[in-house]
Image: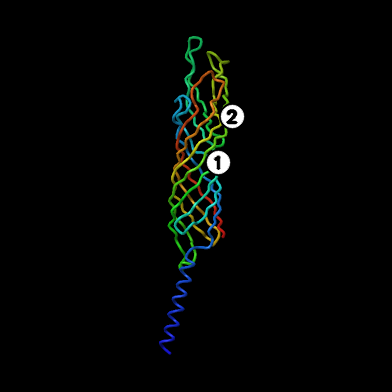
Amino acid sequence: MLTAALAITGTCTSFAQKALWENFLPDLKWDVGVNYGASVITTPQGVDNNYTGSRTHPVPDFSVCVQYAISPNWHLMFDLGSRRWESSGTWQQPYTFGTSLKAQDVNFLIGKPAITESFKLNYAIPFYSGFKSTNRANLTFGIELGLVQTVNDGSVHYSNYNALPDSNYKYVSSFHYGFGIGYTLGAQIGYTYYFLPRWGVSAEIAARYVDVGADVPDGINYRHNISRYHMMYFPETVGVRYRFR
């Protein structure tokens, strides 16, 4: 009887362990989220240096995402993001009435907004609860590939010089790129912590490369080629996640 009891106990223990390990994968495999933070860009390359600017600054970065856990270690995500891309620089003004006019700042609007539609493939290092029954957190490393569209009107805006020797002189104060479309690729590192079985918070830093073909704007008596440019941008965001079956 002792032998039979031990056999039954061993079978039950084995079954329980098997059931536990079968449930090791969380059944909440879908995940939706909203992310908000800031990003900065490098100045565009591949076009005339006069139309790239030399200074950039952080801008708000917003995205929504849907993720599917293929396995505990591999996650596939679709991300739809939006932000404003712009730079600024200084243009030397012409020689007027025997005097050289002072250089003036000009704003280069690259995308308002710049919209990305991308897929991310992440390798996840999962962290579980004490009994290994609940996935409590994920540290992820991954790559990204997708499309980018820049919404812009290709216009040129002027301002009055308002100073001697020619206060009526108008100079270009804002230069807008045209509508553009291209691709984006990059890499990211993220961390998600689920403070409840379904609700979590996340943080991510990333580096993205974009290559865009844009319309050539008119109105400034030039024919410089703005048809294609490339640059980097670096989003840093935090977010809220909700997961479900």
Residue at image mark 1: 82
Q: Where the C terminus falls, by quadrant? A: bottom right
Relative to 46, does residue 97 appear above or below in the rendering?
A: above
Residue 110 image position (x, y, % from top left) = 52, 32
Q: CA distance from mark 2 to mark 1?
A: 17 Å
Image point (46%, 63%), residue name: 128
For this orientation, the residue located farthest to the left is 3
Residue 63 image position (x, y, % from top left) = 55, 45
Image point (53%, 59%), residue name: 29
For this orientation, the residue located farthest to the bottom is 1
**Residue 218's disc number:** none
Residue 164 image position (x, y, % from top left) = 53, 14
Q: Quadrant of residue 8?
A: bottom left
Image point (54%, 53%), residue name: 240
Other-residue count near label 1 (Cα within 10 Å), few / some / many at <14 / 14–19 / ≥20: many
Of 130 and 119, nearer the camera is: 119
Residue 52 image position (x, y, % from top left) = 47, 28
Residue at image mark 2: 153
Q: Quadrant of residue 30?
A: bottom right
Relative to 18, does residue 78 appear above or below in the rendering?
A: above
Which amino acid type is marked by label 2?
Asp
Image point (44%, 59%), residue name: 126
Other-residue count near label 2 (Cα within 10 Å), few / some / many at <14 / 14–19 / ≥20: some
* Colour theme: rainbow
Which amino acid type is marked by label 1?
Ser
